[in-house]
Image (spheres, helix red, strand yellow):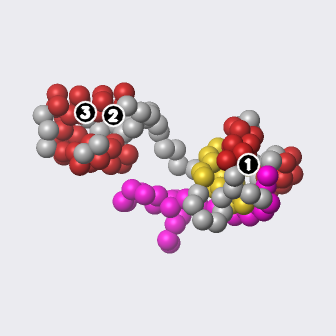
Amino acid sequence: MDAIDRNIVRLLRLNGRMPNRELAAAVGLSPSACLRRVGNLEASGVIRGYTAIVAPTERDGLIVIIRITLERQTEAYLNRFEEAVRQHPEIEECFLMTGDPDYILRITAADAAAYEEIHKTILSRLPGVERIHSSIAVRSVPKHAGVRPKGAYR
């Protein structure tokens, strides 16, 4: 990836629906050259797909960020843990981290009781887990200028 490819990816992350003509102008390419680069980024797996970012609402429930520390950081422990995580659709995201903690997970639960059940029946039974620290998100901070959660900063 060169600087133009990185710029294309940056702009598409901000607006995945940006028309090719606008994208091409923003990165200084012809529309056909830009489209070819986007196609190459998709084919190589750099761009894995496009999605809609939906504003969370109160009815979506609690967003819980979980920090997991494993007993050991050997390849066998990491592989067992990751395979177990893949078996649970309740775990929406899982990131292997450097330093402490070993993993960060994201879960959305209907309410505190639902999260307690996930903690008891899933998280506490994941293989090799030494410590679990959970934090409940208060609200999401929008990344795009001018977008503010309803009722924020009155």
- From the top left corner, tell me how far across and down residue 17 is, in percent: 34, 37
Q: Residue at x 23, y 28 (%)?
A: 36
Above or below, comparing residue 5 to residue 136 in the picture: above
Provide the secondary structure element on which disc 3 rests. Answer: helix
The kind of secondary structure element at disc 2 is helix
Q: Which residue is drawn at 36% across and 27% down?
A: 43
Q: What stretch is highlighted in magenta?
A: 128-154
**Badge count:** 3
| Residue count near mark 3 (Cα–Cα under 10 Å), binned few <14, some 14–19, many ≥20 | some
| Residue receiving disc 2 | 41
Q: Residue tagged by mark 3?
A: 37
Assess disc 2: are there few (<14), some (14-19) or many (≥20) residues with their C-alpha within 10 Å of its C-alpha: some
Residue type, label 2? Leu
* Residue depicted at 23% across the width and 49% down the height: 3
Mark seen at residue 129? none
> Disc 1 or disc 2, which is closer to the eye?
1
